[in-house]
Amino acid sequence: MAKKEKYKQTTEEDSWFIKTWNTQRGRASLKLGIYAIFIVFILILIIFKTPRQKQQQVINYSLDSIKEKESKTQDIAENNYHFEYNLVIDGNKIKYYGDKNKNIEVGYKEDSTGIIKYYKENDLVYKVGLDSKDIIDNLYLNVNVNYLSYFYIDSLIKDLTPTVIDNSEVYQIDSNLKITYVKDNNAITNIIVNDSYNTYDLKYTKINKIPTIGETYEY
């Protein structure tokens, strides 16, 4: 028993950490040291991680540039086509159809409330009446406008391998999202997005055949 007590006493006397921890001032100093080591560790991670992130961004930009050139929708990327979008959003049918040339679009929207004609230039959308043209902000109410953008859709499938069925390429993004490209004479003119219970059926015709569109343009 005496030997054990002597060993325990010797060990405690030789342990600087235990002796320091047993005092209030020493305990505070140890905690401060631990925090300082932790902060230094975080700074080291940031220093070594930042250059790698910048390099990865450059690589991604390069890949995106290549993908843009190889875009499956390259023919309609010129922003010149006739479009027909048939949507089902939460069980409600919405239809957009018209012509687009560069940054100008003239078309119609149909839903359960009726039909409106609209004129869209850049980010401004106008409801066109017989003798009026009023700015509106609800043309795409309850619609995910990302799914109307072929550039956005392309970005979702760029690293995926499709399932080929006849003239269609099917991309299963996840359990809720499926994208289908339909070809006509090897050109993709139809994109179908199935997102949970919503459907975006996008059709493109008269590609690169739409004339210059002005305010008096009649579709």
Image (cartoon, rainbow, N blue to C red):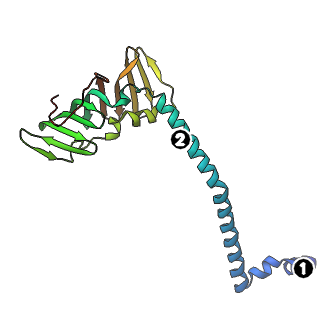
Q: Position of residue 100 (x, y in %)?
A: 26, 31
Decide: few, some or many residues near mark 1? Use Cα within 10 Å; few <14, some 14-19, many ≥20.
few
Please say if 46 is above or below 23. above
Decide: few, some or many residues near mark 2? Use Cα within 10 Å; few <14, some 14-19, many ≥20.
few
Question: CA–CA distance between discs 1 and 2?
Answer: 64 Å
Q: Position of residue 161 (x, y in %)?
A: 51, 26
Left or right: residue 22 compared with residue 136: right
Hey, what amino acid is under mark 1?
Answer: Thr
Please say if 173 is above or below 52. above
Q: Position of residue 60 (x, y in %)?
A: 55, 41
Identify the mark at residue 10; answer none if there is no mark.
Answer: 1
Q: Position of residue 170 (x, y in %)?
A: 43, 24
**Residue 57 in view of the camera:** yes
Left or right: residue 70 compared with residue 37: left
**Residue 158 in view of the camera:** no
Q: Secondary structure at mark 1?
A: helix
Instruction: Determine the image quadrant of residue 88.
Output: top left
Q: Quadrant of the N terminus?
A: bottom right
Q: What residue is at 61 percent from the left and 47 percent from the top?
A: 55
Hey, what amino acid is under mark 2?
Answer: Tyr
Identify the mark at residue 69; answer none if there is no mark.
Answer: none
| Residue ranking furthest to the left | 131
Q: Secondary structure at mark 2?
A: helix
Q: Earlier in the sequence, mark 1 or mark 2?
A: 1
Q: What residue is at 26 percent from the left and 37 percent from the top?
A: 104
